[in-house]
Image (tube, helix red, strand yellow):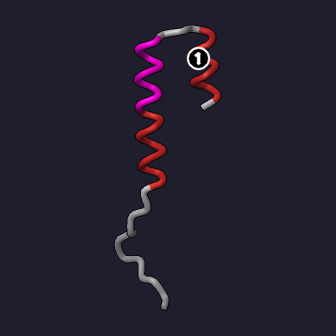
Amino acid sequence: MDGLIIQYVTNPDPSRASRDLERGIDMLVQFADPRPVAGLRRSD
């Protein structure tokens, strides 16, 4: 995230910043969405 901020401060590009922000949000959502792993069994 720091790299994106530094990149924007040193070379502002609104379209790239918007695209990077969308991709970052997508990554965070996918990271926070737990999905079961195939073949993994819970021990109860």
Q: In the rendered view, would you say 2 is above or below 27?
A: above
The kind of residue tagged 1 is: Gln
Residue drawn at 43 percent across, 47 percent down: 29
Q: Nearer the viewer, residue 27 or 41?
A: 27
| Residue that extends furthest to the left in the rendered view of this protein | 38
Q: In the rendered view, would you say 31 is above or below 34?
A: above
Quadrant that contains the N terminus: top right
- Residue 14, given in percent of the width and then of the height, sits at 46, 12
- Residue 36, given in percent of the width and then of the height, sits at 38, 69
Q: Is residue 33 magenta?
A: no
Q: In the rendered view, would you say 25 is above or below 32?
A: above
Left/right placement of residue 20 relative to residue 5 reads left
Residue drawn at 39 percent across, 69 percent down: 37
Q: Is residue 21 magenta?
A: yes
Pointer 1 residue? 7
The residues colored magenta run 14-22
